[in-house]
Image (tube, rainbow, N blue to C red):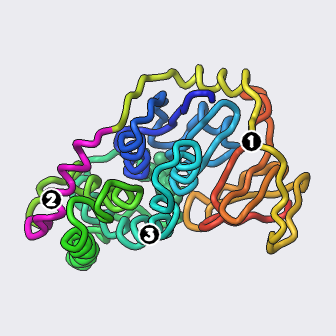
Amino acid sequence: MSEIIFHHYWTSPFSEKVRNIFGMKGISWRSVEQPTIMPKPHLIPLTGGYRKIPVMQIGADIYCDSQLILREVERRFPGPKGEANGISAPLGFWADRAWFPAGIPLIFSVVGDTIGEAFKKDREAMSGAPFDTDRMKQAVPLMREQFRAHTGFVEEQLAAHGDFLTGKPTVLDAQAYMNIWFLTSFVPQVAEPLLKEFTRVNAWAARMKAIGYGKHEKMAREEALAVAKGATSTTREQADPNEPNGLKPGQKVNVMPDDYGKDPIAGVLVASSLHEVAIRREHPEVGEVVVHFPRAGFWVLPA
Ligand SMILES: N[C@@H](CCC(=O)N[C@@H](CS)C(=O)NCC(=O)O)C(=O)O
């Protein structure tokens, strides 16, 4: 198997999830650091327009979104049956879409005035909403309450199961820990008083931190593009017999996230299944690549 090339930046919480899984499974990987804002001239040729982080590359196969990356890592490095893809996978939606948004105002109400205009403009363009630090400051009491309640779910689960959310470290721990990591790394002065009451969460967070990220070595962005260009995708054509909208291999489609950063990615369908859609596309810098997306949380539209 070609090596795992992970496109990320170290301050990215969605990447932290995946880095933790690399650590839990003892996986070696190559680290390609991408910019935190557009333009991303060494990522877009690979993804065809998907600009979010993280992205995992294995040869000429490109996996977008942490949800699908975790699924693919599990497929290639399987752990005990059922732990990664059962209820742990959809609980990622809880961690990403219910809990994570509560952390944003808690962090940016504090650091928002010190970050550059370019970052604010970039996030406004991506979300289609103003990056308004005054509104974030107003939202802090409500969001503090939300963040606390979600942390409380984790505390209760740890009380029932011990050191990790299901007893031993799994994807579920990584999904949830992302939020604690985000708050404690960016605004420890906010995190400390808010999380003080959660003694089990604090002890668990220390255990998660100790798991680390697995062995990783830096790779230049240009080298990652060259790897794609020199490789051939290993994805086989696959039609889903239960495909709900009649999509078939060979059909031209556009794929896009349903939440923010809704840039459509155009390609020709190669394979589709319950949890994945893969499209073929070409770019002079990378040759022919196959880009993979999850189904849940993404739209696939005939072109
Ligand atoms: N659903 C995506 C969300 C990824 C996401 O929002 N990542 C943030 C960084 S943590 C991002 O891409 N921000 C915009 C950027 O970096 O350009 C996933 O699970 O991977």
The disc label shown at residue 202, or none: 2
Q: Residue 102 appears at what percent x and percent y?
A: 32, 70
The residue at 62%/45% (across/down) is 63
Badge 2 or badge 3: first in the primary sequence? 3
**Which quadrant is the C terminus positioned in?**
bottom right
Residue that carries the numbered disc 1 in the rendered image:
290
Amino acid at dot 2: Asn
Give the camera-side residue of 181 and 173: 173
Q: Main SS of the magenta segment? A: helix
User: What stretch of residues is rendered in magenta?
Assistant: 194-212
Q: Residues within 10 Å of mark 2 (few under 14, many from 20)?
A: some
Residue 124 visible? The answer is no
Q: CA distance from mark 2 to mark 3?
A: 20 Å
Residue 23's image quarter?
top left
The amino acid marked with disc number 3 is Leu
Q: CA distance from mark 2 to mark 1?
A: 41 Å
Q: Is residue 114 left or right of residue 258?
A: left
